[in-house]
Amino acid sequence: MDLLVTTAEERPDLVPRMDDWGDWPEFMRRDPVSPLYYRDAVTAHPGFVLIAVDRDHPDRLAAKGYSVPFTWSDDPDEALPRGGWDDVILIAAHDRLAGREGTLVSALEISIRPDLRGSGLSSVMLDAMRRNATDRGFPGLVAPVRPNAKHRHPHLPIAQYAHLRRDDGLPADPWLRVHVRAGGRIAGTSTHAMTIPGSLAEWREWTGLPFDTTGPVEVPGALAPVHCDTAHDHAVYCEPWVWVHHRLAGPVTS
């Protein structure tokens, strides 16, 4: 594949194709914080939105990646936002309103077209995101990683899951493994990287499940149980993610 990886800033003509597919389960589309970023990501932060196309088939996107600059004063090896993905979006929105350029770049999403998954494009896109942050003068790329096999272990605490290893010492989780192979370091976890509240009727609509018993509810695709409270007609999901820090080392010239 003759792949072209560019940005929305460089190729705005490719932006309309970015909605060709989506990876999020329906309930995750209800995160109340995400619209602060996704409502206008390609106009608010076009230089941090990556687009990949096969030059031989330029009418279809091969992959896409979203990232955002944000201000963070602590050492990212020691501390990162406790609220994970949601916190990064909130901080970036505040930075934008205040006219701040940010001190780090955070990955928010890398998505591969379904028929191309398993072809190594996730590593290519992560490398492109690292290069883009480096070339823009940032010292680090951080990523609140949604570990893509955690849904198989919904009751395992994220701090334990993040440190599961294969025999070769690499993370057991495939997406964490991509980050570590690329030079990233697991820097911590967030127990509430996304917080999604809703009425029981809303959760029934989003999942097709009854939500008729108080207590934890296992939802397909969720990384942890959803807490259901029938007395108060309310359920809330706190999704746990893993923080990874990629320390960068100056502009890429090749």
Image (cartoon, grey):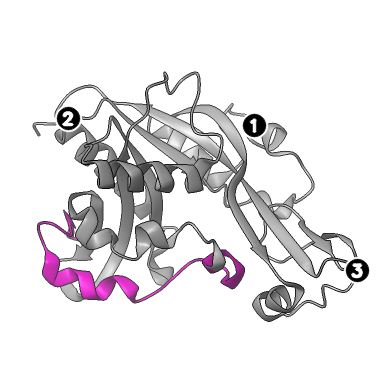
Q: Any mark on residue 112, and which?
A: none
Marks 3/2: CA–CA distance:
52 Å
Marks 1/2: CA–CA distance:
33 Å
Residue 78 percent across, percent down from the top left? 50, 18
Q: Any mark on residue 213, and which?
A: 3
Name the mark nearer the viewer: 3 or 2: 3
Instruction: Indicate whether 135 appears above or below 46.
Output: above
Q: Does the magenta stretch include residue 25?
A: yes
Q: In this view, does 83 lie to the left or right of 184?
A: right
Q: Residue at x 31, y 62 (%)?
A: 63
Question: Where the C terminus falls, by quadrant?
Answer: top left
Q: In this view, does 236 lie to the left or right of 183?
A: right
Question: Where the N terminus falls, by quadrant?
Answer: bottom left
Q: What residue type is labelled 2?
A: Gly
Towards the viewer: 106 or 163:
106
In the rendered image, which residue does mark 1 sit on? 165
Span colored in magenta: 1-29
Q: How many residues crowd mark 1 within 10 Å: few (<14), some (14–19), many (20+)?
A: few
Counting residues from the start of the chain, the first of labels 3 and 2 encountered is 2
Q: Which amino acid does label 1 sit on?
A: Arg
Q: How many residues crowd mark 3 within 10 Å: few (<14), some (14–19), many (20+)?
A: few
Counting residues from the start of the chain, the first of labels 1 and 2 encountered is 2
Name the mark nearer the viewer: 3 or 1: 3
Q: Any mark on residue 137, and which?
A: 2
Q: Residue at x 17, y 30 (%)?
A: 137
Q: For mark 3, give the secondary structure.
A: loop
